[in-house]
């Protein structure tokens, strides 16, 4: 399938990028598993414009619904490969589906470095 933009990651960064891109009238595919977002299972009370304590899952669900409302397509698989075709990119997901896109936004969050000291 062909899209203008592929966004890898369905956390707050990926969803915000998806919403901004879709509002510019480009076609957007968002890939990844929301359950792997660092926000899953959290309680949030410091977001601007979101008063009180909200559960992170609810904020993510609202973000996904908002992005879908602007026309974003969601693929709930991890990306296993991204190939530069020279001007375009070929994105492959773990179900072997492929997406040819003009731009890629990588919003895959962070992983913590541990000291490697045995517990
Ligand atoms: C316990 C806890 C409490 C927190 N509380 C707060 C709080 O109160 N307020 C606050 O502002 N922040 C809080 N945070 C931090 C907040 O969750 C992170 O800042 C935020 O989730 C970062 O967003 P992100 O989109 O950069 O990354 P993430 O939310 O981690 O999203 C990364 C995404 O990338 C995807 N991904 C990774 N690899 C691939 C791949 N190969 N293919 C496809 N997708 C991939 C993952 O599936 C995930 O969807 C908390 C975090 C934790 C752990």
Image (cartoon, helix red, strand yellow):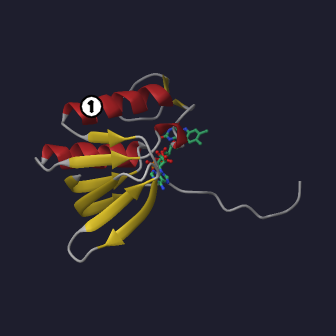
Q: How many badges with numbers are in the image?
A: 1
Viewer-proximal residue among 80 and 11: 80
For residue 113, side relative to residue 34 (left or right): right
Give the farthest residue toward the bottom: 86
The answer to whether 60 appears left or right of 101 in the picture is: right
Would you say residue 49 is visible in this rendering?
no
Residue at position x 44%, y 48% from top?
A: 95
Q: Which residue is drawn at 35% across and 27% down?
A: 62
Could you tell me residue 75's position as x and y percent?
Answer: 36, 42
Nearer the observer, 115 or 48 = 115
Left or right: where does residue 69 sit relative to residue 108? left
Asked if residue 118 shows in the view, the reply is: yes
Q: Rate crowding at label 1 as few (under 14), some (14 to 19) or many (20 or more) other CA atoms within 10 Å.
A: some
Secondary structure under the numbered disc 1 in the rendered image: helix
On screen, 3 above or below 117?
A: above
> Residue at coordinates 22% horizontally, 69% vertically from top-left?
88
Residue furthest out toward the right: 119
Q: Could you say which quadrant of the image residue 48 lies in?
A: top left
Image location of residue 64, percent across then percent down: 34, 33
Q: Residue furthest front?
A: 96
Query: Which residue carries the number 1 mark?
Result: 66
- 3 is higher (above) or lower (below) than 15: below
The picture places residue 86, in percent across and down from the top left corner, at 23, 77
Residue 38 image-quadrant placement: top right
Taking depth in this image into account, of 43 and 64 the one nearest to the observer is 64
- Badge 1 residue CB within 8 Å of ligand 1: no
Residue 52 point in image, percent of width and height: 45, 22
Q: Is residue 112 left or right of residue 75?
A: right
């Amino acid at each position: 399938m062909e899209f203008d933009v592929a966004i890898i990651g369905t956390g707050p960064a990926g969803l915000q990028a998806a919403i901004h891109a879709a509002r510019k009238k480009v076609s957007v595919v968002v890939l990844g598993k929301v359950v792997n977002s660092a926000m899953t299972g959290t309680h949030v009370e410091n977001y601007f414009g979101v008063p009180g304590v909200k559960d992170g899952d609810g904020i993510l669900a609202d973000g996904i619904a908002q992005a879908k409302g602007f026309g974003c397509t969601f693929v709930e698989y991890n990306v296993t490969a991204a190939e530069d075709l020279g001007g375009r990119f070929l994105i492959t997901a773990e179900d072997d589906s492929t997406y040819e896109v003009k731009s890629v936004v990588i919003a895959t969050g962070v992983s913590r470095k541990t000291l490697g000291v045995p517990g």
